[in-house]
Amino acid sequence: MRIRLRIEGPLIVPIAYHALLQQALYTLVPAEVVQDWRRVRGVRPFTFSRLLGRMQQKPEHTIAFAGPIDWWISLRRAEDMRALLDRIAANAVLVLADQRRDIIGVAVEPPFVWTRTLMGITTLSPIVADDNINGHIISYGPDEPLFQDHIAHNAEIKAQQFLGHAAGPLAIYPLEAVRVRSWYGTTPVVGYRGRFLLAGDPDLLTLLYDVGVGRRNGLGFGCCDAFLPTSAHEAIAHA
């Protein structure tokens, strides 16, 4: 399930604001929900977008949003969504980088169900495929075979954890991809934003919509919106 929070502006955040968004999410749900997320080994049952709105990069490595600002949060479990909505109903305030901003709008999507074997996605936060090799982070791009391998392997881990069984192969096809260098705290994270095609089992595609594509979803990477592929897109997938 997915919720869009509309936040009042203006708002100034550091360029490396992914960790701040994660902390903000943790304050929007009860402590027992956060504890449950942290107890689970493996993939977090959520992801979230970057901040979306009119923005301008400022000196001293900051970004200024004029407002209003949209923030999408995607949650796999309905009970987590209910807990989030209850908290917002009681106190519609977001605290980000020591700034308090009113939540001026809330839109909840109905549960997402994809029934086709091909899904188009538009990134709401960059898709990441990387490895930590001997303390060095190695990132892979859509033009490298290892990008495909890592996205597919990560999807299989998610299928086993959330669906309880293998979901078959997954393929990803880039339509438009732009390299983005982000930060989580002091850790650089290289990802790709743009538009992609995902081919696989419909239950797996639905799951990836909920929990994110690629790695580091719990840090706010791999959140995507879905669109219906055209016949031209289908030709790309079947080439």
Image (spheres, rainbow, N blue to C red):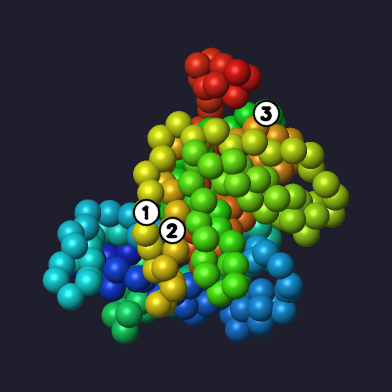
Residue 51, position as x, y percentages in the image: 35, 60
Query: Which label was assigned to residue 190?
Result: 2
Using the image, tell me which numbered label, if any, was put on residue 180. Answer: 1
- Residue picked out by circle 3: 116
Q: Name the residue type under label 1.
A: Val
| Camera-side residue of 51 and 237 | 237
- Asked if marks 3 and 2 touch (Cβ < 8 Å), the reply is no
Say which element carries label 1.
strand
Give the vertical position of 188 relative to 211 (above or below): below
Left or right: residue 238 versus residue 181 is: right
Give how far across and how far down residue 57 sits, in percent: 19, 62
Element on which disc 2 rests: strand
Pointer 3 or 2: first along the chain: 3
Residue at the image point whose x is 23% and y is 66% from the top: 63
Q: Residues within 10 Å of mark 1 (few under 14, many from 20)?
A: some
* Residue 158, above or below 27: above
> The C terminus appears in which quarter of the rendering?
top right
Determine the secondary structure under disc 3: loop
Mark 2 or mark 1, which has the lower sequence index? 1
Q: Amino acid at mark 3?
A: Arg
Task: Name which residue lies at 66% across and 82% down.
Answer: 35
Looking at the picture, does residue 133 appear above or below residue 109?
below
Q: Nearer the viewer, mark 3 or mark 2?
A: 2
Q: In x, y percent, where is residue 204?
A: 71, 43
